[in-house]
Protein backbone atom coordinates (compact mmCIF):
# COMPACT_ATOMS: atom_id res chain seq x y z
CA UNK A 1 0.00 0.00 0.00
CA UNK A 2 1.05 3.57 -0.58
CA UNK A 3 0.95 6.42 1.93
CA UNK A 4 1.60 10.13 1.50
CA UNK A 5 3.40 12.73 3.57
CA UNK A 6 3.98 16.47 3.52
CA UNK A 7 6.71 18.28 5.40
CA UNK A 8 5.31 21.79 5.31
CA UNK A 9 7.87 24.55 5.80
CA UNK A 10 7.75 28.30 5.52
CA UNK A 11 9.81 28.25 2.33
CA UNK A 12 9.05 24.84 0.80
CA UNK A 13 6.69 21.92 0.95
CA UNK A 14 8.32 18.52 0.66
CA UNK A 15 5.76 16.01 -0.61
CA UNK A 16 6.41 12.28 -0.84
CA UNK A 17 4.64 9.01 -1.47
CA UNK A 18 6.07 5.88 0.12
CA UNK A 19 5.56 2.17 -0.22
CA UNK A 20 4.57 0.56 3.05
CA UNK A 21 2.42 -2.26 4.39
CA UNK A 22 -0.13 -3.01 7.09
CA UNK A 23 2.66 -4.10 9.42
CA UNK A 24 4.62 -0.87 8.97
CA UNK A 25 5.46 -0.80 12.67
CA UNK A 26 7.45 -4.02 12.37
CA UNK A 27 9.34 -2.98 9.23
CA UNK A 28 13.11 -2.87 9.78
CA UNK A 29 13.68 -0.35 7.02
CA UNK A 30 11.90 2.98 6.63
CA UNK A 31 9.28 2.98 3.85
CA UNK A 32 10.75 3.33 0.40
CA UNK A 33 9.98 6.72 -1.11
CA UNK A 34 8.54 6.21 -4.61
CA UNK A 35 8.27 9.86 -5.60
CA UNK A 36 8.89 13.22 -4.05
CA UNK A 37 8.57 16.86 -4.95
CA UNK A 38 9.54 20.20 -3.47
CA UNK A 39 6.98 22.90 -3.96
CA UNK A 40 7.79 26.49 -2.97
CA UNK A 41 5.47 27.77 -0.26
CA UNK A 42 3.45 30.46 -2.01
CA UNK A 43 -0.07 31.57 -1.17
CA UNK A 44 -2.19 28.74 0.26
CA UNK A 45 -4.60 28.20 -2.68
CA UNK A 46 -1.94 27.78 -5.34
CA UNK A 47 0.31 25.78 -3.02
CA UNK A 48 -2.52 23.40 -2.02
CA UNK A 49 -3.41 22.96 -5.70
CA UNK A 50 0.17 22.07 -6.66
CA UNK A 51 0.45 19.58 -3.82
CA UNK A 52 -2.87 17.98 -4.76
CA UNK A 53 -1.56 17.66 -8.33
CA UNK A 54 1.51 15.84 -7.05
CA UNK A 55 -0.58 13.29 -5.12
CA UNK A 56 -3.27 12.99 -7.80
CA UNK A 57 -1.81 9.95 -9.67
CA UNK A 58 -1.24 8.00 -6.44
CA UNK A 59 -3.79 5.85 -4.70
CA UNK A 60 -2.67 6.74 -1.19
CA UNK A 61 -4.39 5.18 1.83
CA UNK A 62 -3.55 8.09 4.11
CA UNK A 63 -1.77 11.43 4.22
CA UNK A 64 0.21 13.00 7.04
CA UNK A 65 1.14 16.66 7.34
CA UNK A 66 3.94 17.91 9.60
CA UNK A 67 3.64 21.67 9.42
CA UNK A 68 5.15 24.96 10.51
CA UNK A 69 2.87 26.52 13.12
CA UNK A 70 1.28 27.49 15.28
CA UNK A 71 -1.41 24.89 14.62
CA UNK A 72 -4.73 23.88 16.09
CA UNK A 73 -4.29 20.22 17.14
CA UNK A 74 -7.34 19.99 19.39
CA UNK A 75 -9.72 17.50 17.77
CA UNK A 76 -12.69 19.06 19.57
CA UNK A 77 -12.00 22.48 18.12
CA UNK A 78 -13.87 23.95 15.14
CA UNK A 79 -10.52 24.93 13.66
CA UNK A 80 -8.76 21.58 14.18
CA UNK A 81 -6.23 21.06 11.37
CA UNK A 82 -5.74 24.79 10.78
CA UNK A 83 -2.57 26.83 10.73
CA UNK A 84 -3.56 29.52 13.25
CA UNK A 85 -1.76 32.73 14.23
CA UNK A 86 1.28 32.40 11.97
CA UNK A 87 3.14 35.52 10.89
CA UNK A 88 3.49 33.85 7.47
CA UNK A 89 1.51 36.12 5.18
CA UNK A 90 -1.68 34.59 3.79
CA UNK A 91 -1.51 31.45 5.94
CA UNK A 92 -3.21 32.70 9.04
CA UNK A 93 -6.32 30.64 9.95
CA UNK A 94 -6.06 28.33 6.94
CA UNK A 95 -7.56 24.87 6.98
CA UNK A 96 -4.61 22.73 5.93
CA UNK A 97 -5.67 19.19 6.95
CA UNK A 98 -9.32 19.70 5.98
CA UNK A 99 -8.43 20.82 2.46
CA UNK A 100 -6.71 17.49 1.81
CA UNK A 101 -9.27 15.39 3.69
CA UNK A 102 -12.09 16.85 1.57
CA UNK A 103 -10.18 16.57 -1.72
CA UNK A 104 -8.98 12.99 -1.20
CA UNK A 105 -11.47 11.50 1.28
CA UNK A 106 -8.73 9.68 3.19
CA UNK A 107 -7.50 9.96 6.79
CA UNK A 108 -5.23 13.01 7.16
CA UNK A 109 -2.88 13.15 10.14
CA UNK A 110 -1.78 16.60 11.25
CA UNK A 111 0.90 17.77 13.66
CA UNK A 112 3.87 20.10 13.97
CA UNK A 113 6.91 19.61 11.71
CA UNK A 114 9.04 18.67 14.71
CA UNK A 115 6.48 16.27 16.15
CA UNK A 116 6.38 14.55 12.75
CA UNK A 117 10.18 14.33 12.75
CA UNK A 118 10.40 12.78 16.21
CA UNK A 119 7.67 10.32 15.23
CA UNK A 120 9.59 9.26 12.11
CA UNK A 121 12.74 8.70 14.16
CA UNK A 122 10.80 6.69 16.77
CA UNK A 123 9.16 4.54 14.07
CA UNK A 124 12.16 3.85 11.85
CA UNK A 125 15.21 5.84 12.96
CA UNK A 126 17.52 6.72 15.83
CA UNK A 127 14.83 6.66 18.52
CA UNK A 128 13.35 3.34 17.45
CA UNK A 129 11.63 1.60 20.32
CA UNK A 130 11.81 4.60 22.66
CA UNK A 131 8.73 5.47 24.67
CA UNK A 132 9.96 8.99 25.24
CA UNK A 133 12.24 10.90 22.88
CA UNK A 134 12.75 14.43 21.60
CA UNK A 135 13.83 15.93 18.29
CA UNK A 136 15.45 19.36 18.36
CA UNK A 137 15.99 21.33 15.18
CA UNK A 138 18.34 24.30 15.24
CA UNK A 139 17.87 26.05 11.92
CA UNK A 140 16.09 29.24 10.88
CA UNK A 141 14.16 28.75 14.09
CA UNK A 142 14.47 26.31 16.96
CA UNK A 143 11.78 23.68 17.39
CA UNK A 144 11.36 20.66 19.61
CA UNK A 145 9.16 17.65 18.89
CA UNK A 146 8.22 15.60 21.93
CA UNK A 147 7.19 11.95 21.90
CA UNK A 148 6.13 11.09 25.42
CA UNK A 149 4.99 7.74 26.88
CA UNK A 150 4.19 6.37 23.44
CA UNK A 151 2.45 9.37 21.86
CA UNK A 152 3.13 12.86 20.59
CA UNK A 153 2.85 15.57 23.22
CA UNK A 154 0.15 18.19 22.66
CA UNK A 155 -1.67 20.17 25.32
CA UNK A 156 -3.20 23.61 25.57
CA UNK A 157 -1.63 24.46 22.19
CA UNK A 158 1.52 22.43 21.59
CA UNK A 159 4.91 22.65 23.26
CA UNK A 160 7.12 25.51 22.07
CA UNK A 161 10.31 24.37 23.74
CA UNK A 162 12.47 26.29 21.25
CA UNK A 163 11.53 29.43 23.19
CA UNK A 164 12.64 28.41 26.67
CA UNK A 165 14.68 31.10 28.38
CA UNK A 166 18.42 30.59 28.73
CA UNK A 167 20.99 32.37 30.82
CA UNK A 168 23.07 34.59 28.67
CA UNK A 169 26.71 33.57 28.47
CA UNK A 170 29.07 36.04 30.19
CA UNK A 171 30.34 38.50 27.60
CA UNK A 172 27.66 37.75 24.97
CA UNK A 173 26.33 41.18 24.12
CA UNK A 174 24.09 40.06 21.27
CA UNK A 175 20.55 41.15 22.10
CA UNK A 176 18.81 38.10 20.63
CA UNK A 177 16.65 37.64 17.59
CA UNK A 178 13.27 36.65 18.97
CA UNK A 179 10.75 39.52 18.94
CA UNK A 180 8.91 37.98 21.90
CA UNK A 181 11.71 37.11 24.34
CA UNK A 182 15.01 38.73 25.12
CA UNK A 183 17.01 35.62 25.85
CA UNK A 184 15.21 32.56 24.54
CA UNK A 185 16.87 29.60 22.84
CA UNK A 186 15.67 30.56 19.36
CA UNK A 187 16.67 34.17 19.88
CA UNK A 188 20.20 33.31 21.01
CA UNK A 189 21.03 30.10 19.14
CA UNK A 190 19.15 29.89 15.80
CA UNK A 191 21.11 30.10 12.54
CA UNK A 192 20.07 33.72 11.92
CA UNK A 193 21.10 34.60 15.51
CA UNK A 194 24.59 33.20 14.89
CA UNK A 195 24.79 35.17 11.65
CA UNK A 196 23.64 38.44 13.18
CA UNK A 197 25.89 38.07 16.23
CA UNK A 198 29.05 37.33 14.25
CA UNK A 199 28.19 39.25 11.07
CA UNK A 200 28.81 36.36 8.65
CA UNK A 201 27.07 33.35 7.14
CA UNK A 202 27.00 30.50 9.66
CA UNK A 203 28.67 28.02 7.30
CA UNK A 204 31.55 30.44 6.68
CA UNK A 205 32.27 30.56 10.44
CA UNK A 206 33.19 26.85 10.52
CA UNK A 207 36.81 27.49 11.59
CA UNK A 208 35.98 29.96 14.40
CA UNK A 209 36.09 27.88 17.58
CA UNK A 210 34.58 30.57 19.81
CA UNK A 211 31.43 30.64 17.65
CA UNK A 212 30.69 26.96 18.18
CA UNK A 213 31.70 26.94 21.84
CA UNK A 214 29.15 29.63 22.55
CA UNK A 215 26.57 27.88 20.37
CA UNK A 216 27.19 24.55 22.13
CA UNK A 217 26.83 26.26 25.48
CA UNK A 218 23.34 27.50 24.58
CA UNK A 219 22.22 24.24 23.00
CA UNK A 220 23.55 22.29 26.01
CA UNK A 221 21.67 24.50 28.46
CA UNK A 222 18.45 23.72 26.62
CA UNK A 223 19.30 20.01 26.30
CA UNK A 224 20.00 19.74 30.04
CA UNK A 225 16.63 21.37 30.75
CA UNK A 226 14.83 18.99 28.37
CA UNK A 227 16.53 16.04 30.08
CA UNK A 228 15.27 17.26 33.44
CA UNK A 229 11.75 17.96 32.21
CA UNK A 230 11.00 15.14 29.74
CA UNK A 231 13.55 12.47 30.74
CA UNK A 232 13.88 11.41 27.09
CA UNK A 233 15.47 8.07 26.22
CA UNK A 234 16.99 9.60 23.09
CA UNK A 235 17.74 13.16 21.99
CA UNK A 236 17.98 13.80 18.29
CA UNK A 237 19.59 17.04 17.23
CA UNK A 238 19.41 18.39 13.70
CA UNK A 239 18.71 21.44 11.54
CA UNK A 240 21.06 23.52 9.39
CA UNK A 241 23.24 24.63 12.33
CA UNK A 242 24.00 21.03 13.32
CA UNK A 243 25.73 20.56 9.98
CA UNK A 244 28.64 21.85 12.10
CA UNK A 245 29.05 18.32 13.40
CA UNK A 246 31.77 19.35 15.87
CA UNK A 247 28.82 20.69 17.90
CA UNK A 248 27.70 17.19 18.88
CA UNK A 249 30.70 16.44 21.08
CA UNK A 250 30.68 19.93 22.58
CA UNK A 251 26.97 19.72 23.37
CA UNK A 252 27.36 16.28 24.98
CA UNK A 253 30.21 17.47 27.22
CA UNK A 254 28.46 20.62 28.29
CA UNK A 255 25.06 19.05 28.82
CA UNK A 256 26.75 16.60 31.20
CA UNK A 257 28.43 19.44 33.03
CA UNK A 258 25.15 21.32 33.29
CA UNK A 259 23.41 18.32 34.84
CA UNK A 260 26.11 18.34 37.49
CA UNK A 261 25.97 14.60 38.10
CA UNK A 262 22.40 14.82 39.35
CA UNK A 263 20.72 12.64 36.70
CA UNK A 264 22.31 9.23 37.25
CA UNK A 265 21.94 7.00 34.24
CA UNK A 266 24.52 5.55 31.83
CA UNK A 267 22.67 7.30 28.99
CA UNK A 268 23.45 10.74 30.38
CA UNK A 269 26.96 9.69 31.44
CA UNK A 270 29.27 7.15 29.77
CA UNK A 271 26.86 6.40 26.90
CA UNK A 272 26.06 10.01 26.10
CA UNK A 273 27.58 9.50 22.63
CA UNK A 274 24.64 7.23 21.75
CA UNK A 275 22.16 9.40 23.61
CA UNK A 276 22.52 12.77 21.87
CA UNK A 277 22.65 11.90 18.19
CA UNK A 278 21.83 13.08 14.66
CA UNK A 279 18.76 11.57 12.96
CA UNK A 280 19.08 8.14 11.36
CA UNK A 281 16.65 9.06 8.58
CA UNK A 282 19.13 11.50 7.03
CA UNK A 283 17.39 14.44 5.37
CA UNK A 284 14.04 12.63 5.57
CA UNK A 285 12.83 12.52 9.18
CA UNK A 286 10.26 15.24 8.51
CA UNK A 287 8.65 13.75 5.45
CA UNK A 288 8.86 10.12 6.63
CA UNK A 289 7.47 11.24 9.96
CA UNK A 290 4.60 12.85 8.07
CA UNK A 291 3.95 9.52 6.29
CA UNK A 292 3.87 7.91 9.75
CA UNK A 293 1.39 10.54 11.02
CA UNK A 294 -0.94 9.58 8.19
CA UNK A 295 -0.63 5.86 8.96
CA UNK A 296 -1.45 6.53 12.61
CA UNK A 297 -4.46 8.60 11.60
CA UNK A 298 -5.70 5.71 9.48
CA UNK A 299 -5.55 3.44 12.53
CA UNK A 300 -7.29 6.08 14.63
CA UNK A 301 -10.19 6.14 12.14
CA UNK A 302 -10.43 2.34 12.09
CA UNK A 303 -10.98 2.20 15.86
P1 LIG B 1 14.84 25.64 8.14
O1 LIG B 1 15.02 25.84 9.60
O2 LIG B 1 14.42 26.89 7.44
O3 LIG B 1 14.01 24.46 7.80
P2 LIG B 1 17.58 24.70 8.10
O4 LIG B 1 17.31 23.74 9.21
O5 LIG B 1 18.37 24.21 6.94
O6 LIG B 1 16.25 25.33 7.51
O7 LIG B 1 18.31 25.95 8.74
C1 LIG B 1 18.80 27.00 7.99
C2 LIG B 1 19.78 27.82 8.82
O8 LIG B 1 20.83 26.98 9.26
C3 LIG B 1 20.43 28.92 8.02
O9 LIG B 1 19.77 30.15 8.31
C4 LIG B 1 21.86 28.96 8.52
O10 LIG B 1 21.95 29.98 9.48
C5 LIG B 1 22.08 27.65 9.20
N1 LIG B 1 22.99 26.79 8.42
C6 LIG B 1 22.78 26.22 7.23
N2 LIG B 1 23.85 25.51 6.81
C7 LIG B 1 24.76 25.63 7.80
C8 LIG B 1 26.09 25.10 7.99
N3 LIG B 1 26.69 24.33 7.09
N4 LIG B 1 26.72 25.43 9.13
C9 LIG B 1 26.11 26.20 10.06
N5 LIG B 1 24.90 26.71 9.94
C10 LIG B 1 24.22 26.45 8.82
ZN1 LIG C 1 11.43 33.39 21.80
Image: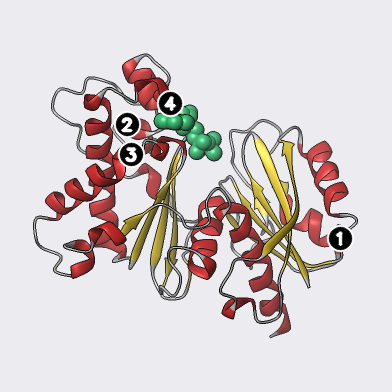
> Closer to the observer: label 1 or label 2?
1
Name the side, left or right, on which 43 lies relative to 130. Answer: right
| Residue drawn at the location 63% of the way across and 54% of the way down | 287
In-front residue for pair 27/261: 27
Is label 4 within 8 A of ligand 1 (CB to nearest ligand atom)?
yes
Dot 3 and dot 2 residues touching (CB under 8 Å) = yes
Which callout, 1 or 4, points at the residue further toward the start of the chain? 1
Q: What element carries label 2?
A: helix
**Residue assigned mark 4:** 192
* Residue 84 on image: x %, y %: 62, 46
Q: Quadrant of residue 163?
A: top left
> Closer to the observer: label 4 or label 3?
4
**Residue assigned mark 2:** 188
**Which mark identifies residue 185?**
3
* Residue 161 on image: x %, y %: 38, 50
Per the model, the C-alpha gap separating discs 1 and 3 is: 41 Å
**Residue assigned mark 1:** 58
* Residue 3 on image: x %, y %: 74, 65
Per the model, the C-alpha gap separating discs 1 and 4 is: 38 Å
Dot 1 and dot 2 residues touching (CB under 8 Å) = no
* Residue 132 on image: x %, y %: 38, 70
Amino acid sequence: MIAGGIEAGGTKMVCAVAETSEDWREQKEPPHILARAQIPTGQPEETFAKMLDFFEPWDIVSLGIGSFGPLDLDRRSRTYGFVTSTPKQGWENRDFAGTFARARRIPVGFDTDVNAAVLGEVAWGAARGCETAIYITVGTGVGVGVYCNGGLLHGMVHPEAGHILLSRAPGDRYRGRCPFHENCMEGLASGPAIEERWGARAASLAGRREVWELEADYIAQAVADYILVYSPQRIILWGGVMHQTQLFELVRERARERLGGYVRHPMAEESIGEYIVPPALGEDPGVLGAVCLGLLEREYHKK
